[in-house]
Amino acid sequence: MNRTHPKKIAIFGGSFDPPHLGHLEVIKKALQSLDIDKLIVVPAYISPFKKGHSAPPQLRFEWLKKITAFDPRIEVSDIEIKKGGPSYTIDTVNHFSEIFDTIYLIIGADNLESLHRWHRFDELNRKVKWVVATRNGEKIPEGFIRLEVKMPISSTKLRRNIVPEWIPEPIREEVLQYYSKHTKENRD
């Protein structure tokens, strides 16, 4: 079959609650170092390993679209948001494997310890090339591609203490307003 679409993609999924400069750095490094035609950012409706998210899915999706508009090779997909419920990576990979030939799956090094517990891990492991974004020079198992990111920041830490400089400029004010109001409501 002769395909006219890109054949090699990377998928970068997560909560992105909120999106921050570390996420952008992962995206930029992936575009620079991986042999891909497209990078698809997939915000989860809800992660199977979390009880919920602070910001609603559609808002996180819109934020991601705003901060990734700088490169036409980046697509923000709402596949998991439209599906609703827990987001399983294997379902997302299966969807995109019907369209693309090669799939790199970008994960954070903090996921390595629990990777074997991911839904249908063995099937997922056969279908993707693993890319691990590291923040602190963590050891990466053989067979995984290292993506060194020099920004030791996490969305969890940001939700506890919003540091404006870590939020991308196009969404900074929105994110600051949202989380300051949300955090205040949770304290009241």
Image: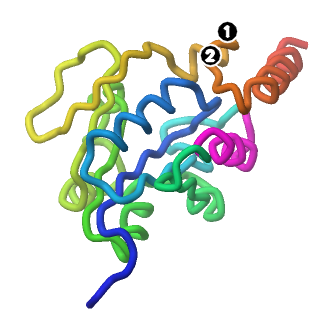
Do tag 1 and tag 2 residues touch (Cβ < 8 Å)? yes
Q: Is residue 133 left or right of residue 170?
A: left
In screen coordinates, is 117 left or right of 72? left
Residue bearing the label numbered 2: 158
Residue topped by disc 1: 161
**Which kind of residue does numbered mark 1 sit on?**
Asn
The image quadrant where one finds the N terminus is: bottom left
Q: Residue furthest left?
A: 142
- Quarter of the image holding residue 175? top right
Task: Depth check: give the residue in front, 138 or 83.
Answer: 138
Q: Main secondary structure of the magenta part?
A: helix
User: How many numbered marks have been drawn onto this rendered protein structure?
Assistant: 2
- Magenta region: 55-68
Q: Secondary structure at mark 1?
A: loop
Q: For the residue marked with disc 2, what is the amino acid?
A: Leu
* Residue 62 belongs to the span the image colors magenta: yes
| Image x and y of residue 173, in percent | 81, 24
Q: Quadrant of residue 77?
A: bottom right
